[in-house]
Image: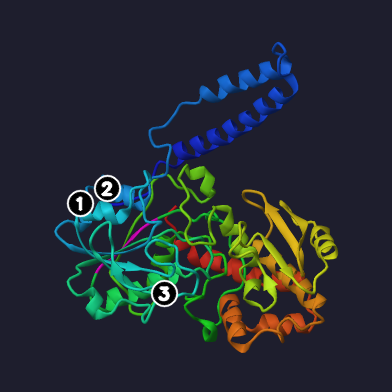
Amino acid sequence: MFAGGGLGSVQLIARRIRHMNMLRWRLRSVAATGSGRSPNGHFKRALLFLVTVLAVPASAHAVVDLGIDVLEQSNYAILKGKRVGLVTNQTGVNRKGIRTRVLLRQNCNLVALYTPEHGLDGTEKAGRYVKSRKDRQTGVMAYSLYGPTRKPSRDMLRGVDVLVFDMQDIGCRGYTYISTMGKCMDAAAENHIPFVVLDRPNPLGGNRIEGPSVESSWISFVSAFPVPYVHGMTVGELAKMVNAKGWAGERCDLTVVPMHGWSRAMMWGDTLLRWIPTSPNIPRPGSCSAYVVTGLAGELTGVETGVGGHAPFEMISASWLNADSFTRYLNSLGLREISFHSLSRGRQQGSYFTLSRDPETNLTGVGIYMLAEINRASGGAVFRRTSRSKLDIFFKIYGSSSIRSQLERGASPAKIVASWEGNEASFRRARAPYLLY
């Protein structure tokens, strides 16, 4: 019933948007240099460019149709006559911004909600328990899956005929929404309830694969599946792979409602969709890339990454760093499409960075270069400064404790990053049967 399509037209529109952005830049440049004068050659060329862009035929499907949009277009056929449980939060919306839980309340028999880390509204801080409560918008009970339990209990699922998942992920293994999905798939299987994933774009695109996988002893809620740190899959594709491999436990009766119009080369800006902050420290689409770079190091004592500020994850600092020398080192690496700038905030010294929309640089690798230099500048003490409980979380997110011994032995960041290449290539092959786009 459900299949992807319309890729060519959407790619055309995405290209058209980029052309329009280029035009705006050109016209601003003309205005800055030619204000108050008759049209010169530059301005005429800009006008000609405008005519050319507008001549490109428009498409009725300029915006990517999300899984929820495709479900709407089918008149919710697979949910008709069933009591529906929905795993969701504030990011579960259709392309017009209408919440999925409101749509299912209006058009289906929505009987229960289930909420992840950060809660139904996405405002709770990371790691803070979320309470179950009645949702004011729908009047339906919203059971917390980030409190005493991370997996829906039999009582929570009583009276549910089908369990639906609709949340926006960020494309990084350490972000816990996919872990919640896995727990719900396991519960659905145990209770013989069909599981439906309404698919959404990966904001990092579908081609970026980076970093180590997770050693079996380090599988946890912050690294639930043995996939690279950046996996390049949508939640629907990942659900298919997780289910086939049995990574979530017993295999469930899985249906993925795919998007129409999304392709692997698309970044978030190409989708024409509005970004809804997935959590307090992912306020913008670019925050997803920044999270990949510094999210690991932020678990170490004395290292700050801007969390709680205006640019979370877009900086890194420590009290023992020298901002200028640290920034000079990072810029000397010649990493493509990322630049570093000195940062001093009281005793904290370091760098903030700016990324292009889709940098060619291995973002996970950038974090390792940063971490290696931070460790060197600390006299090799960055791990010794960190409590056992925090180190445990750090190793779980990285997927192994080997990173500590590698850095303490003096292994170069380049060697560590190169050691991932076999794993990245192997995963690219392994995921191929589960790709939808």
Residue 264's place in the image compared with 212, above or below, is above
Q: Disc 3 marks which residue?
A: 245
Q: Foreground residue, 178 or 214?
A: 178
Q: Amino acid at mark 2?
A: Glu
* Residue positioned most to the bottom: 388
Front of the two marks 3 and 2? 2
**Labels 3 and 2 touching (C-beta < 8 A):** no
Q: Residue at x 80, y 58 (%)?
A: 331
Q: Is residue 323 left or right of residue 434?
A: right
At 71% from the left edge and 27% from the top edge, which residue is drawn?
29
The colour scheme used here is rainbow
> Whole-percent x and y of residue 292?
61, 64
* Marked residue nearer the N-terminal end (3 or 2): 2
* Residue at image point 55% right, 78% down: 214
> Residue 307, position in %: x, y?
60, 65
Label 3, secondary structure: give it.
helix
Q: Mark 3: which amino acid?
A: Lys
Say whether disc 1 or disc 3 marks the residue closer to the N-terminus: 1
Highlighted range, magenta: 194-199
The amino acid pointed to by label 1 is Asn
**Left or right relative to 427: residue 199:** left
Q: Are marks 1 and 3 in contact (CB under 8 Å)?
A: no
CB under 8 Å between discs 1 and 2: yes
Res 244 seen here: no
Kindly identify which residue carries mark 1: 107
- Percent x, y of residue 304: 67, 70
C-alpha span from label 3 to label 2 = 30 Å
Q: CA distance from mark 1 to mark 2?
A: 9 Å
Query: In the depicted view, which residue is nearer to us: 336 or 1?
Result: 336
Q: Secondary structure at mark 1?
A: helix
